[in-house]
C-alpha cells in the first residue's frame, strides 16, 4: 500500500467516524428533547393509558355435599372494623352526654 492509498483509507475512516458521531449526537439530542422538554407530558400519557381500576365479582354457587344438601351458599356480607381510637372517642362522648 503506497502513501496515496493510505491517505484515502484514512480519509474514509475519518469520514465514517464523523458520520457515526453525527448520528449518535442526533440521537442524543432527540433523547434529551424527549426526556427534558416533553417528559412530563409523556409520563402523564403513559400513566393515563396503563392504570385501570375495576372490580370483578366472582360468580359463585352453592357448595353441596354428596347427597345434595347445601353446605355453604353465596350471600352478601359486610365487614365492620372497630379500632381502639374509635372506642376511646366514643367513651369520651358518652361521658360528656351523661
Image: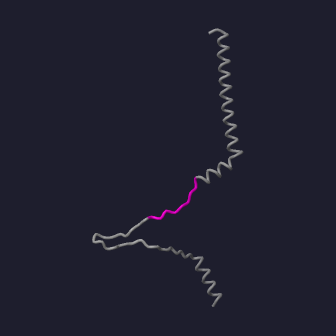
Q: Position of residue 76 (x, y in %)?
A: 46, 73
Q: Which residues are drawn in magenta?
A: 50-58
Extreme-left residue of the structure? 67
Color theme of the render: one colour
Work out whether 46 lies above or below 78.
Answer: above
Most common SS among magenta residues: loop
Extreme-right residue of the structure? 37
Quadrant location, the C terminus: bottom right
Near-viewer residue (37 or 14): 37
Quadrant location, the N terminus: top right
Work out whether 2 lies above or below 69.
Answer: above
Query: Quarter-wise, where is residue 75 in the image?
Result: bottom left
Residue drawn 56% across the image and 57% down it: 52
State yes or no: residue 53 in magenta: yes
Q: Position of residue 21 (x, y in %)?
A: 67, 29
Near-viewer residue (14 or 26): 26
Residue drawn 68% across the image and 25% down it: 18
Residue drawn 47% across the image and 74% down it: 77
Work out whether 8 lies above or below 75.
Answer: above
Amino acid at each position: 500500500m503506497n502513501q496515496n492509498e493510505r491517505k484515502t483509507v484514512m480519509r474514509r475512516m475519518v469520514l465514517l467516524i464523523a458520520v457515526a458521531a453525527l448520528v449518535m449526537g442526533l440521537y442524543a439530542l432527540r433523547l434529551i428533547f424527549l426526556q427534558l422538554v416533553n417528559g412530563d407530558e409523556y409520563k402523564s400519557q403513559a400513566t393515563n393509558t396503563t392504570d385501570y381500576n375495576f372490580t370483578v365479582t366472582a360468580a359463585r354457587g352453592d357448595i353441596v355435599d354428596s347427597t345434595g344438601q347445601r353446605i355453604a351458599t353465596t350471600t352478601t356480607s359486610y365487614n365492620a372494623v372497630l379500632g381502639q381510637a374509635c372506642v376511646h372517642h366514643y367513651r369520651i362522648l358518652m361521658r360528656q352526654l351523661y
